[in-house]
Image: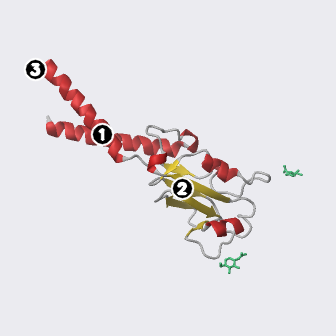
Amino acid sequence: MACMKNNTSKTMFLWLIFFTSLHCLSVSFEFQVGGNNGWVVPPVNDSKTFNDWASENRFQAGDTIRFKYKKDSVMEVSEEDYKKCNSTHPIFFSNTGNSLFRLQRSGSFYFISGVSGHCQKGQRMIVKVISEDESSPGDNNKSSAGSTIVAVGVSKLVFAHFVFFSVASYLF
Ligand SMILES: *[C@@H]1O[C@H](CO)[C@@H](O)[C@H](O)[C@H]1NC(C)=O
Ligand SMILES: *[C@@H]1O[C@H](CO)[C@@H](O)[C@H](O)[C@H]1NC(C)=O
């Protein structure tokens, strides 16, 4: 407080720490599949609904997707089973009505409904997860995916601020 010049360099140093820690946190996002409609049988003649939704979003390893549905289920299956709507041996299965799936790696994930006939009506989706080097830094164009993302993003920011000020009060 006594010395202005010193304070300025301290502030700059703290901002440096702040942005470095933000970067290292590698913010992950949560997406609600299908937006507000959730995981449902798409309307007639709109069988591309979920793939359209998926292609509008940028998924990165570590992100999660949430499936919300009633009297339905969700399965992760192989590409082959996706094409055939074959639900006999899923890699992942959930029918809780509110399923969270973490996209652990880059590459493609295939999802179908486990309810007979629903996959054939278009309730299926391919999620392509981009790898770290494909993603351009600072690209946060995820607005179309709903409000949960904003909430998650904000809470991460709050956490980053918390870390920042903890470090600041410890150092000075
Ligand atoms: C769906 O598409 C078919 C052919 O493209 C058309 O005949 C039918 O009327 C459409 N149905 C609806 C509900 O739009
Ligand atoms: C689904 O996959 C299983 C195992 O690969 C196979 O036995 C079955 O015939 C398949 N069903 C359909 C409808 O393709």
What's the residue at 34%, 47% (across, down)?
Answer: 25
Whether 140 is drawn above or below 6: the answer is below
Mark 3 against mark 1, which lies toward the viewer?
Answer: 1
* Element under disc 2: strand
Instruction: Tell me the number on the disc at residue 2.
Output: 3
Whether 70 is drawn above or below 140: the answer is below
What's the residue at 26%, 39% (across, down)?
Answer: 164
User: At label 1, which amino acid type do we have?
Assistant: Thr
Q: Marks 3 and 1, Cα distance to the nearest angstrom?
A: 28 Å
Q: Nearer the viewer, residue 33 or 86?
A: 86
Return the disc, 3 or 2, that comes first in the chain's sequence: 3
User: At label 3, which amino acid type do we have?
Assistant: Ala
Residue 166 on image: x %, y %:
22, 41
Residue 114 on image: x %, y %:
65, 69
Residue 77 on image: x %, y %:
60, 68
What's the residue at 59%, 53% (across, down)?
Answer: 33
User: At label 2, which amino acid type do we have?
Assistant: Arg
Residue 40 appears in view: yes
Residue corresponding to mark 1? 20
Whether 6 is drawn above or below 84: the answer is above
What's the residue at 69%, 65% (across, down)?
Answer: 83
Return the disc, 3 or 1, that comes first in the chain's sequence: 3
Instruction: Tell me the number on the disc at residue 66.
Output: 2
Q: Marks 2 and 1, Cα distance to the nearest angstrom?
A: 29 Å
* Element under disc 3: loop
Residue extending furthest toward the left: 2
Q: Is 11 placed left or right of 101 in the picture?
A: left
Residue count near mark 1 (Cα–Cα under 10 Å), binned few <14, some 14–19, many ≥20: few
Instruction: Indicate the quadrant of ligand 2 in the picture.
Output: bottom right
Which quadrant is the N terminus positioned in? Answer: top left
Return the disc, 2 or 1, that comes first in the chain's sequence: 1
Residue 151 on image: x %, y %:
46, 43
